[in-house]
Each structure stands twice: as C-alpha cells, then as structure tokens.
Image (cartoon, rainbow, N blue to C red):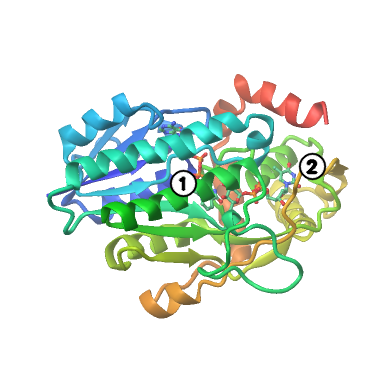
Amino acid sequence: MKTILITGGAGFIGSHIVRFFVNKYPHYRIVNLDALTYAGNLENLRDVEDKPNYEFVKADISFDKEIMPLFEKYRFDGVIHLAAESHVDRSISNPMEFIITNIIGTVNLLNAARHIWKDQPEGKLFYHISTDEVYGSLGEEGYFTENTPYDPRSPYSASKASSDHLVRAYYHTFNLPIVISNCSNNYGGNQFPEKLIPLFIHNIRNNKPLPVYGKGENVRDWLFVEDHTAAIDLIFHKGKTGETYNIGGNNEWRNIDLIKLLCRIMDGKLGRAEGTSEKLITYVKDRAGHDLRYAIDSGKLQHELGWSPSVDFEKGLHKTVDWYLANEEWLNNVTSGDYKKYYEEQYLKR
Ligand code: NAD
Ligand code: DAU
C-alpha cells in the first residue's frame, strides 16, 4: 500500500484532490496534512473522513520540527503539495505570512522528502502545485508556456515563484524526484469567499455591493476545479520527473463580463427580475500591481498526457452557484468571526 501525503487538503483545491484520491485509490493511504488556517475547513471533507484509507494530521509546514517526524513516521511514497497562503489581496496587506508558508514551508517539505528518500528515490515523487501567476502579466496577446520567463509581480506570486525555483533546485542539486504544474484560476464549490466567484455569489445572495477592482477589464482563464483535479491525477501518475506542466481552461473572461453572467445566473436562480443583481456592481479602487491578463497554453499537457478541460464554463458556473446556494450553512460558518474583520479592512476602508 502506498502512502501519499497531500498538504493543504482542507482547503479549496486540496479538499477536491483528497476526496478524489481517497475514492479512486482505496489501496493508497491518503494523509491530509493541514494547519487549518482561516482557509482550511474539515467540513469540506465530511464525506470521506471515515474512510479507512484517509487520515488527517494537523501540522504547520513552516515548522520543520512538526514536519520531519511525520515523514519519519509515515515514510511517504509521494507528496502532493498544495498548502499555501493563496490570496493575492492578503499578500499585499501581509506579505510575511506568504514568505513563511509558501517558501520556508516548501523547503521544510523538500528537506524532509530528501531525508527519507535519499537512498531510494526510485518510484517516489514530490509534486508541487503552483500557479500561472509566476509568469507575470500578459498584454492583449500571447499565452504562458512552460518556457515563459518568470516575472511575478505580487508578494503571493513571488513567493510561489520562489518555491517553484527551490523545488527545481532540489531536483538538479539533490536528484529529488519532482514534478511541477502551474494552473490558472480555479472555481467550484468549497472555495473560500475571499476569491472573486464565491465572494460575489455570497454578496449577490445577500444584496451587498459587488466590489469590482478598477474598470473590471482584467482577464483571467477559468478552470473548473474538477478539471484541475483530473490533471493533477494524470501528472502525479504519468508526468515525467523534473518536468513542468501548464494547466488552463482555454477560457478567458474579462472580470466584468464574468460578473454580469454570474448576476444573470443568480437572478434566475433567486427568482429576481433580470438586471436586479447587476445593480449591485460597484467600481472600487484597483488592486495594487493588478496583473492585466493571464492565459495558459496547456498544449504540452494535452499532447503529452492527453488531458483537456471538460467542463463548459456556463455549466460549471451553474453547478458552482447551486453548490453555494445548497450549502448556506457552510458559507455562514466561514463568513462569521475573523471574516468580518477581513471584509471590513479589505472593502469597507477601501
Ligand atoms: P486555499 O487557500 O483554499 O487552501 C490552502 C490550504 O493550505 C488551507 O487548507 C490552509 O489551512 C492550508 N495551509 C495554509 N498554510 C499552511 C501551513 N503553514 N501549514 C499547513 N497548511 C497550511 O488554497 P487553494 O485555492 O485551494 O490553493 C491550493 C494550492 O493551489 C496553492 O498552492 C495555490 O497556490 C495553488 N493554486 C491555486 C489556484 C486557485 O485558483 N485557487 C490556481 C493555481 C494554483
Ligand atoms: O491564476 C491563478 C490564481 O488565481 C491562484 O494562484 C490564486 O491562488 C487565486 O487566488 C487566483 O488569483 P486571482 O488574484 O486571479 O483571483 P481572485 O479571485 O482574487 O481575483 C480574480 C480577479 O477578480 C482579479 O482580476 C481581481 C478581481 N477581483 C477580485 C476580488 C476578490 C475584483 O474585481 N474584486 C474582488 O473583490
């Protein structure tokens, strides 16, 4: 039986990966390591928590004293590393947390993997989950490929770029078997309502203003989280050691167009007259250093491993809205307490 460590498994993407691996691979023991920060929520995994091949460990990757003993105890065969501080706006107000978790935390995991695999790296894999934001900001034309030079522009993306470099350095210097993927914007259920889509669903539901940064002309390439999960499964099992794979939805939207579509969908589902939710749109001060456009060329993954995005965006958005409307208690729980303070500082003082 293989033992696979998934870090950040209580978060948005991590919880989808954990559920998928626990159900698809009953012969793997899946260990979910998560510090349960504001973004980590074990509610996300209620349906798998009693499965015999699932285990949760509360630990903080930024403390090597917590990490090394876990690697010694479990002797992991593979690592899928998602734990991170992930929200750009928070990285602008508090960069240091991003440096500590995303850089130091990743190095702690690399050191621990190196320590237990040093004699027998064959068949082992450290899979680092990263972002398209490491490549910087595109103009109107072009796509990010795996060869696009790194040009991160926010503390979040700089910390992720730094962790990517370190993962590659451990491959070249210490022969640590690694693979990296860089993905575009994910959406779907269980995403913390600080990110655009769940935040706006929550605000539309509650008739609150929809804070559009700048003119709403920034472009993102959206991918349904289950398509990202399928790509991660494929790369973990079939990806070539030492390689990088870009993952994207081939699905670019200007923020304002996406927001108007979301408003129309929500009006329909909430039984409101068409145009009601759009009236909530409020243009606010732009995000500092706001990247204009991300667009991924995922040709390498498509041609070499046969992956392609499968979920049509409008259908995926309907599914996502349905999930939040059906899980009001989840939303109420995560938007109580600290969230209120975050919201006030991020939006009401803007
Ligand atoms: P998230 O913020 O929803 O979840 C992060 C998880 O990591 C949480 O469960 C949190 O408790 C945990 N965590 C944070 N600090 C930790 C620490 N010090 N020790 C242990 N656990 C800790 O993030 P997400 O959106 O699911 O993103 C997951 C990963 O995927 C991140 O590495 C992110 O950079 C990457 N990514 C995200 C997207 C996206 O659109 N959300 C796109 C591409 C890549
Ligand atoms: O591209 C991948 C990245 O996508 C991931 O690495 C990050 O972890 C993830 O958070 C996401 O980053 P973005 O900054 O693109 O996502 P966010 O949902 O924060 O914002 C999407 C766009 O919407 C962006 O142009 C900023 C804008 N926006 C966002 C918020 C929260 C607004 O206009 N208003 C808002 O209130």
Across and down, in percent, residue 176 comes to 27, 53
Asked whether, in this view, residue 53 is left or right of residue 67, the answer is left
Q: Which residue is mark 2?
A: 210
**Total of numbered circles in the picture?**
2
Q: Residue at x 38, y 32 (%)?
A: 61
Across and down, in percent, residue 179 comes to 35, 59
CA gap between label 2 and label 1 equals 33 Å
Q: Secondary structure at mark 2?
A: strand
Asked whether, in this view, residue 345 is left or right of residue 150, the answer is right
Q: Nearer the viewer, mark 2 or mark 1?
A: 1
Q: Mark 2 is on which residue type?
A: Leu
Q: Nearer the viewer, residue 24 or 205?
A: 24
Asked whether, in this view, residue 216 is left or right of residue 247, the answer is right
Q: Mark 1 is on which residue type?
A: Ser
Across and down, in percent, residue 309 comes to 50, 69
Asked whether mark 2 and ligand 2 are closer than 8 Å, the reply comes as: yes
Q: Residue at x 54, y 47 (%)?
A: 323
**Among the 4 quarters of the image, the one containing residue 155:** top right
In what quadrant of the picture does the C terminus appear?
Answer: top right
**Among the 4 quarters of the image, the one containing residue 233:** bottom left
Q: Secondary structure at mark 1?
A: helix
Q: Is residue 9 visible?
A: no
Q: Which residue is mark 1?
A: 163
Asked whether, in this view, residue 141 is left or right of residue 31, the answer is right
Across and down, in percent, residue 264 comes to 76, 56
Reading the chain from its start, which is encountered first: label 2 or label 1?
A: 1
